[in-house]
Amino acid sequence: MKRALALAAWVAAFALIPVAIPAVPAVESSLRPMARPAAEAGRAVITPVSTGAAGFDRWIAEFKRTARRKGISAQVVEAAFAGISYNRDAVRLDRNQAEFSKTIWDYLDGAVSSSRVSNGRAAYRANQSALQAIERKYGVPAQVVVAVWGMETSYGSYRGSSDVIGALATLAYDGRRAAFFEAQLLAALEIIEDGDISPRAMRGSWAGAMGHTQFMPDSYLSYAVDFTGDGRRNIWGQDPTDALASTANYLAKKGWVKGQPWGVEVQLPPGFDYGLTGRDTKKSPRQWARLGVRAMDGRAVSANGRASIILPAGAQGIALMVFKNFEVIERYNPADAYVIGVGHLADRIVGGPGFQGGWPRGDRALHVSERRELQERLTRAGFDTKGVDGRIGPNTEAAIRAFQKRAGLVPDGYASADLLATLR
C-alpha cells in the first residue's frame, strides 16, 4: 500500500497533454565534471564481510533482515533482491572515477555545444506546455530545468541501464562508501514499497542515479513529485514530466529566487582590484557598477540582489557576476564548471548569446596530483587551503589570492601551472 506522502498535496491541477522527447541526432553523455557528492548519511547498518564477490550473498542475507527491521515488507525485499549479482563494473567505476582534468573552456565547449543547444531548444518546444505549468508552480525557469536535463542525460537519451538495486547493493557491500550506499539502498527499497516502480524496472547509472535528471534514491524520496497526477512519481519513463517537475521542486526547495539570474557575464574596468573577486565578497549590482563593473553591453547589471564576481579561468578569462541562484544550482552538483554549464546552456536555449570574453586557451588543466601539491605547498607556506583533496574550491581559491597578494601577483585565485611553478 502506498505510503501517504506530503508530496501528494502538490499533485498538479493542470490537465497536461502527453509530452514527447524529441529525436536527438547525436547521443551526448552526461557532462558532470565529477560524481555528485552527497553527505555520508547515517551510520553503516552493516559492516562489509569482505571485498570482492565472495561474501556478497551472505551480505545480502543480512541486509534483507536489516531492511525488514526498517519496515520494508518481506514481499518487496524478496522481489528486490531476486536474481541480483555482484556488479563488478560498478565497483570498477566507483574506484576509478576519472578526475576532472579538463579546462573550463574545454568542458563548456562540450556542455554547451551547438548540438546540445539545438537539442535543448527542440526539447523545450516539445514539452512546452508541461514546462510552462512547472514554471508557474515552482518558479524555476523552464530553460534551467531543461538545461539540467540536458547536462544529466542529454534530454533523456541516456538515462542509465544498470539495475539500481544490484548496483547499490554491490557498492554498499564493497565498503568504500558503505554508509552512503546502504542509505541509498534502503531509500530505493522504500520507493519500491511505495509502488512507484517495480524492482527490475528501476534502472539508472552504475551509482544508482535514476531517471531523466538523475535523482539518487534519497533525493527522490524528498523531492520527487507526481506532476501528471497518475498516482506515480515516474522519473524513469518516456514522458519526462514528473522528472522535470521534480527537478524544479528540488531547486525551489533549495532556495531558488524567482526572477533572479544565475549569473551575468561582465566586463571589469582597467585597474580593477582582483582581490574583490571570489564568493566571499558580495555587493549589489549598483555597488559593483560604482566600481566600474558593467554588463557586456556597457550598462549596469540589473538589481537582482547581492552578487559576487568570479573568474573561472583567472584574470585572462571571462568574468561572471553570480547571484544566489548560482548557489542553488550548486546544490545539484557543486562543481563550478557544472553550474556555469547549466546556467549558460539555459541562457542559450532561450536565445542568449555565447560568452563574449576570451579564454586563456594556451593554459592546461592541472592533474589531480598537481592540485594536491598546490594545496600542500600553499598550506605549508602559511596559506591554509582547509584540506588537501585535489579539488579547487572557495577555500583553495582564497588561499591562492592571499598568496598572490603577498607575492605581488594578480590576485585572481586561479590555480594554474604557472602558479604551481612559482610555489615550487
Image (cartoon, grey):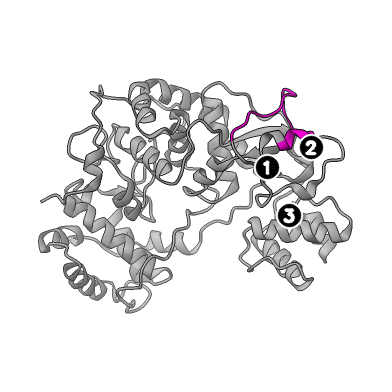
Magenta segment, which residues? 287-304
Distance between the Cα atoms at labels 1 and 2? 10 Å
Q: Secondary structure at mark 1?
A: loop
Inspect the image, locate mark 1, and give the three-letter code of the amino acid beneath it: Lys
Distance between the Cα atoms at labels 3 and 1? 24 Å
Residue to which mark 3 is pinned: 415
Vertical order, 61 against 30 (above or below): below
Inspect the image, locate mark 2, and give the three-letter code of the amino acid beneath it: Leu
Vertical order, 390 against 28 (above or below): below
Other residues around mark 3 within 10 Å, as few (<14) / some (14–19) / many (≥20): many
Residue 413 screen position, x and y as percent: 74, 53
Outermost residue, right direction? 408
Whichever of callouts 1 and 2 sits on the residue coming sooner in the sequence is: 1
The image quadrant where one finds the C terminus is bottom right
Are the residues at dot 1 and dot 2 in contact (C-beta closer than 8 Å)? Answer: yes
Residue 98 screen position, x and y as percent: 55, 56
Residue 162 visible from this viewpoint: no
Q: Secondary structure at mark 2?
A: loop
Residue 24 in the figure: left or right of residue 186: right
Residue 270 in the figure: left or right of residue 384: right
- Mark sitting on residue 291: 2
- Mark sitting on residue 227: none
Residue to which mark 1 is pinned: 283
